[in-house]
Image (cartoon, grey):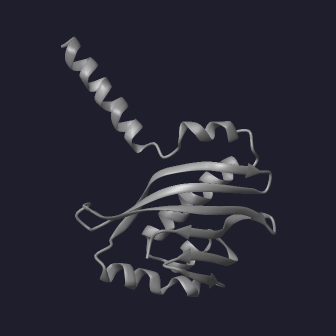
């Protein structure tokens, strides 16, 4: 019985560790004023993205916001500029996404640069794709939001 309890505890610890999306390297920035808000904004970004609601998702951005991907710079001016994302991704088989890794690499009082790896999943939870990216999170006009993203996603 004791071995089962130890095994169950170890399994639970590994499961929790597997869900962690912070990196030990970014703990050096925990005292930075932007550290907590950067994680909060990117948490809201991902959860609202998965609702497929452009208005909710757009609330996590500072507009204008830029996206650099596929050798193209796109300026996003409002949530309306996000609406076609869902249909395009859905046509590729996308159902939802999740953070695999997030790491603050630069941080000041009103801005953080966060390296991320995100995974796109199909409805059956199989991996569709995985991409590395850089998010710029800023305090602008009294609110935290994403001001720019650069990714290797198409």
Q: Specify the quadrant of the image occupied by residue 4.
A: top left
Expressed as whole percent of the image width and height from the top left, the position of residue 146 reads 65, 67
At a point 59% along the width and 83% down the height, the residue shown is 74
Apparent side of residue 35 relative to residue 9 in the rendered image (left or right): right
Front residue of 12/91: it is: 91
Q: Specify the quadrant of the image occupied by residue 99.
A: bottom left
Asked if residue 100 is positioned above or below residue 73 in the image, the reply reads: above
Apparent side of residue 133 relative to residue 90 in the rendered image (left or right): right
At a point 61% along the width and 41% down the height, the residue shown is 26
Question: How many marks do you count on the picture?
Answer: 0
Quarter the N terminus occupies: top left
Asked if residue 29 is positioned above or below residue 102 in the image, the reply reads: above
Asked if residue 111 is positioned above or below residue 84 in the image, the reply reads: above
At a point 53% along the width and 41% down the height, the residue shown is 23
Residue at the front extreme, as displayed: 71
At a point 64% along the width and 49% down the height, the residue shown is 105
Quarter the C terminus occupies: bottom left
Q: Specify the quadrant of the image occupied by residue 91.
A: bottom left
Expressed as whole percent of the image width and height from the top left, the position of residue 2 reads 22, 12
Front residue of 116/11: it is: 116
């Amino acid at each position: 019985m004791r071995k089962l309890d130890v095994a169950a505890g170890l399994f639970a610890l590994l499961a929790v560790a597997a869900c962690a999306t912070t990196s030990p390297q970014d703990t050096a920035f925990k005292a930075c004023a932007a550290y907590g808000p950067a994680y909060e904004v990117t948490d809201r970004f991902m959860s609202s993205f998965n609702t497929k609601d452009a208005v909710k998702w757009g609330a996590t951005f500072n507009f204008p916001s830029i996206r650099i991907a596929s050798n193209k710079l796109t300026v996003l001016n409002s949530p309306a500029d996000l609406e076609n994302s869902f249909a395009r991704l859905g046509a590729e088989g996308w159902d939802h996404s999740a953070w695999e890794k997030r790491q603050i690499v630069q941080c000041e009082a009103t801005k953080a640069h966060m390296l991320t790896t995100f995974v796109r999943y199909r409805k059956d939870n199989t991996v569709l794709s995985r991409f590395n990216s850089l998010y710029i999170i800023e305090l602008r006009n009294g609110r935290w939001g994403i001001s720019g993203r650069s990714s290797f996603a198409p």
